[in-house]
Amino acid sequence: MAEDKKIGAAVKTAEAFVAAHGKPARAVVENIGRAGARVVLVGDDGAMGDVILPTVEEAEAVVAAVADLEAHEWDRETTAALKIGPAHRRKMAGR
């Protein structure tokens, strides 16, 4: 039951991201080990977001459940679609 709530919440988060950042949006599912799986969201406007789920299967189910969210890999097109600003770069650099 708790897992269904996590999936439902992740679907709502992904739907809100797509609504805010344009469609179609891209989703890359990443296995992050014991922590579970990360769904990296890339909006049509280049924005990036993510949701974390307990398993890769649940992450893939979220991607399948959201209209206008397309499964992708980290290929040239997906990485080129990202528009990472200076604030995000500073955050990732630990500054």
Image (spheres, rainbow, N blue to C red):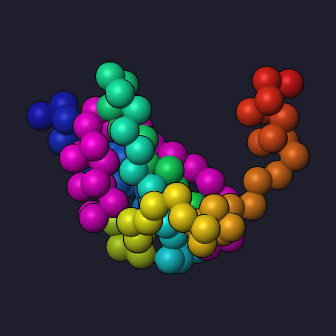
Q: Is residue 7 above or below residue 82?
A: above
Residue 14 drawn above or below residue 24: above
Q: Residue at x 44, y 65 (%)?
A: 72
> In front here: 65 or 30?
30
62 relative to 80 in the view: left or right: left
Residue 13 visible at all: no
Q: Is residue 88 above or below residue 60?
A: above
Percent from the top left, x then y, of residue 53?
33, 37
- Identity of the residue drawn at 60% across and 72% down: 77
Q: Is residue 76 visible?
A: yes
In-image side of 1 versus 16 (left or right): left
Q: Looking at the figure, which quarter contains the N terminus?
A: top left
Q: Residue furthest left?
A: 1
The stretch in magenta equals 44-65
Q: Is residue 23 magenta?
A: no
Position of residue 20 in the picture relative to residue 37 (left or right) = right
